[in-house]
Image (spheres, coloured by chain):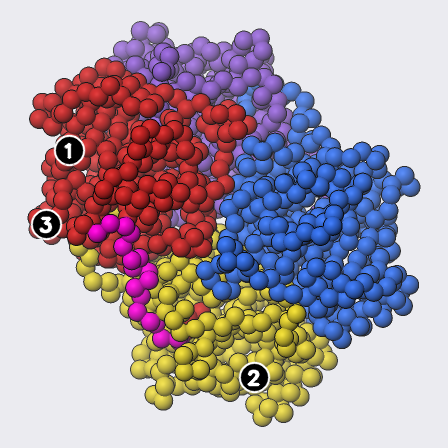
Chain colours: A blue, B yellow, C red, D purple
Amino acid sequence: MNGPANNELTRDVAHIHHAELLTPTPQESLEFFTELFGMQIESRSGQSVFLRGWGETQPYGLKLTESALPGLGHMALRAWSPEGLDRRVEAIQAAGLGKGWLDGDHGHGPAYQFRDPDGHGIEIFYEAERYQPPEHLRPRLKNVPQRHVDRGASVKRIDHVNVLAADVAANRAFAVEQLGCRLYEQVILDNGEEAGAWMSLTIAAHELIYTADHAGESAPPARLHHFAWFVDTREELLRAADLFLDADVPIEAAPSKHAVAQGMFLYVYEPGGNRVEVTTGTHFIYDPAYAPVAWTQAERARGQAWGVKTIETFHTYGTPDVNGIVGPPIPPTSQIPGAPGGAIA
Amino acid sequence: MNGPANNELTRDVAHIHHAELLTPTPQESLEFFTELFGMQIESRSGQSVFLRGWGETQPYGLKLTESALPGLGHMALRAWSPEGLDRRVEAIQAAGLGKGWLDGDHGHGPAYQFRDPDGHGIEIFYEAERYQPPEHLRPRLKNVPQRHVDRGASVKRIDHVNVLAADVAANRAFAVEQLGCRLYEQVILDNGEEAGAWMSLTIAAHELIYTADHAGESAPPARLHHFAWFVDTREELLRAADLFLDADVPIEAAPSKHAVAQGMFLYVYEPGGNRVEVTTGTHFIYDPAYAPVAWTQAERARGQAWGVKTIETFHTYGTPDVNGIVGPPIPPTSQIPGAPGGAIA
Amino acid sequence: MNGPANNELTRDVAHIHHAELLTPTPQESLEFFTELFGMQIESRSGQSVFLRGWGETQPYGLKLTESALPGLGHMALRAWSPEGLDRRVEAIQAAGLGKGWLDGDHGHGPAYQFRDPDGHGIEIFYEAERYQPPEHLRPRLKNVPQRHVDRGASVKRIDHVNVLAADVAANRAFAVEQLGCRLYEQVILDNGEEAGAWMSLTIAAHELIYTADHAGESAPPARLHHFAWFVDTREELLRAADLFLDADVPIEAAPSKHAVAQGMFLYVYEPGGNRVEVTTGTHFIYDPAYAPVAWTQAERARGQAWGVKTIETFHTYGTPDVNGIVGPPIPPTSQIPGAPGGAIA
Amino acid sequence: MNGPANNELTRDVAHIHHAELLTPTPQESLEFFTELFGMQIESRSGQSVFLRGWGETQPYGLKLTESALPGLGHMALRAWSPEGLDRRVEAIQAAGLGKGWLDGDHGHGPAYQFRDPDGHGIEIFYEAERYQPPEHLRPRLKNVPQRHVDRGASVKRIDHVNVLAADVAANRAFAVEQLGCRLYEQVILDNGEEAGAWMSLTIAAHELIYTADHAGESAPPARLHHFAWFVDTREELLRAADLFLDADVPIEAAPSKHAVAQGMFLYVYEPGGNRVEVTTGTHFIYDPAYAPVAWTQAERARGQAWGVKTIETFHTYGTPDVNGIVGPPIPPTSQIPGAPGGAIA
């Protein structure tokens, strides 16, 4: 029978309702997310634009905000209930990471603002509006939030957020204990250090990921690794790669399958320099007492699921950049040394 | 902001751990599930065989049991925690539908046995084993429960159970209030009668479905409409249709997309006469205050998502059969009147 | 060893270079093909617009022309060589079906105009331009003719033409003997009458199809059944159905698989009333002595590959309409009688 | 209009009917092709086994023969007609590369044996049997040669052969002029040397490929780069990677898309040491005057379609191995240096 279960934990948090991405190139980034990721502009306010994927029941999943440097603005969590919200605020305050209440923002009510141990900004609220499509976006089936979209990757909804942290263990513990995240997979180095934690608030394989920031002292805190958006099929993801190639989008990692969490991935850089992913995959965890899968350093060194070596920049690049460089790095796929003209079928 | 939310409900139940299917043709049914659905025989006991899909973390998702008539043996729910189990048993007893405790069964601990208002047998337990693959089925990636399978449809895991009920409203209310199911979609006839309720214990679009049994008085109670197994991609489902065709499996409904819950479907009859489905689709409900989608009689009359008319037997056939007939009915696809030899490209 | 082979036939014709579709609603049809089929406007001339799919190496595959009635304008065949062109013209004239030479049209040189026994207009030429994309449509890989497109179904290229004929046998014989088409599949009714002939100029399963026109005496000659455009994957075709549904496109036949030629299909009506298909599938015939597959009336009555009954209008509707009605018929999928509100998962 | 066309060439050859693979580990290789590639044993003779994919209309596409070293046994071409066969034999003899007539082999009639300039063994014949499935493999649709298969990759048919040559230009010229292959794509190094030629006998993007053998003097002549088998969908190819991973098949190159010819690929080593590919893709060339696409050294250095670097062994390994090593090399995907345990989501 199962050993100590992680199912006595709180379940007061429902999901990541939206996330805010900072960009030093707001116009280019906006065009990228609308034309290449296929998102809709749902609303605008000040230096921010609220964007949505066609399958989101909330008004938006992305808040894109102009900023001197790229990176994470904040993550917004939706509580399961008003009571759950109060319980979480109390726990966060007890942990000494609380900041205070905000009146709310477009599409949601009062939100409590706090930080994780690494300093990433997070907000939590319960009251939220349900998306009501305008006539030109009205779907023909009432259980679909909006008409299907055919622009670019036509992403369906925000799927997960991967942030970097100097101390993965401390942040993982906070996410599990104070936020009620369930730990499904992690990477434990030979020296015992935690190098990555894949957590979720649902049966979906991952929703909040912490991975080690190797930049060390020199690095700014609270860095972002990537945001990921979901598409329903692997074929849509493969097609997105064709569209991105023709649009000169810097592809960091071509489509392949992750070993961890089994998701299909396609990583690119948006104009502001942030790494963004198109993902799909349906690895569910129904077991309420699921024992987390721990990957060793050697197992990770084998690369991704089918043996593809993990792109080096994947281990070194985050936003804001350690060297303060703004804008997307030169994609590794352009740095390939000339291969002999030989067997290249 | 949202109106009355259904998120104050209990969440003591994690998922449908397995379901028991009764068959008058045990050998033929076993061959069907192993060779055509691609399931593994995990264990045997008495007149039952325990079968699993390659992606199930529990030892098995199907208990196949010999019986004079086909139909549902029982559904087994896994509680979220020991405390949750106690709370559910108390609530069920208070509802007057409890039967009593069983010592447990292969792969799980003590289970409390009860019935829904229509009489379907249900069990609930917390203690359960995690599947440990034998060496020949050991996967190469440790977050996959078992090696991938290439037999037939290679189903991944049991996805949902659809039972028939004389009074859908009463059973829906029991599932929501006593079991903590979340109601995502339903069909309300013009006369106000509830004709169907799609419920789930997770963000997945459906896990437990009640639809109206039109057989009326003459019908035996607690009938089964179908069990469904999940595959990761629509291509796997389309390919399953090719394999089933070559294997003379009676296809009741060819691959298409459901309007309700947006799932892709393929319905066939297993040798015992039970309807079984291969399904896929990734329609998630993250909103903790999701207002159920209610379909009207007219909307349903439009057929499935892309306009395919719902097969007539889908509204009339369940197991056990009303007329006591045993074995699969003649598939409607063989009853098609001769079409003119004309434009049939 | 093989019996009499059909491989001694001429192979002077390379492929159907383009086809001309007549429409009484030129603006609506143009918007349909650009926005919903995802084609590009390559050129305009008089009452015609030349449209292309992203994967066509020729400038265009569709010539859309305004006309009082919908239907086929003409089919244009490209000869394999100048010598082959001369040989075909001679053979066609000998068969008494020639009309005469045209100076050529946009994108191709001198063309010889003729008719098949049923009266369908056909042209044949050799000299043709290769598509040169403008900068904004320049692909990043030089073996792709144009950038990938993300509008609507994003069709790749015209795939086949299906015309109706009062005497299938006579037209099939002409296509095989005078044009060098290879007969791969056909339907032979119990009375010995040929009801359909699927022919191709390449290894592709079909390029020119003749099916019986059941309208009889009352029907105008030289009617069109449908034009079909190719997409690379079945997922693209399934997604097209979602997009068409949201755009209120009349869907005549939802996505499924043909028994004949094994192609995946999706049939809709364009605003002018013509039936058009999105198709995919990779059934190749490499055997130079392939013996045609002959389907019986009973086999056809079984419906499509997975048992879906062939939509009735598929046997009765063509353009121009027998009753002179202009515009798309009411899609059969809207004529479905109300189904009981029962088991409709 | 087009410049000098390559469409005046002979079209006497229909396709590569089958190919013979040599293996020093006959039992292991046979198990690989039957269990992992999903092929059927159609016949046996002496030290050879004849294997087929489910979609082949000829009895077999692979002749697997025991040999001291791995590599190509021979390629077998099917002529378009008896007359075409005679013309090709005459042309080959005139080129001084003929060897003589063989009585024939299982499934086909008299064959003329010859070599290409690099020394690869080739045979050409016209008379050939059509596959007749035994009852247990009889398909339910008469235009499918055999029941669908669910073992391993379930390959449909042999798709292309890629051989290595010291002088690509000389062999390309022979294939075009004496065999009637159509040149669709090639690689021209900065020094003007031809490094690769992708040719086909049909509209399919490639059927016979010559790429430069970099091993130079030390290398044995007539080496093989790989044989490729077709599957209908990219999803089947991706799934094959999961199955191969669990079966410990050495994966040389994980699934991705080729720039040249646009095919999706998955390269592995069979137990005998030969490289074999699972491929899919539907890039057709209908233009009879298609001007070959010439890739530069710099363009090739950019890697595959989506930027994946071409695996190094792809440029250096062929069979038989230059160093006389027998058996599959250590897959490069196992040689990946330990990646930091960091951002590996």
Nearer to us of marks 3 and 2 is 3
In the depicted view, which residue is nearer to us: A245 or D80? Answer: A245
Q: Which residue is mark 3?
A: C218
Q: Which residue is mark 1?
A: C116
**Residue type at numbered disc 2:** Phe
Q: Is residue D330 left or right of residue B159?
A: right
Residue C327 part of the magenta segment: yes
Residue stretch in magenta: C325-342
Mark 3–mark 1 Cα distance, whole angstroms, equals 20 Å
**Residue type at numbered disc 3:** Ser
Quarter-wise, where is residue D232 in the image? top left
Q: Chain of mark 3?
A: C
Residue D247 part of the magenta segment: no
**Cβ atoms at labels 3 and 2 below 8 Å apart:** no
Determine whether the residue tagged by mark 1 lies in a helix, strand or loop: loop
Residue B174 numbered mark, or none: 2
Prevailing SS of the magenta stretch: loop
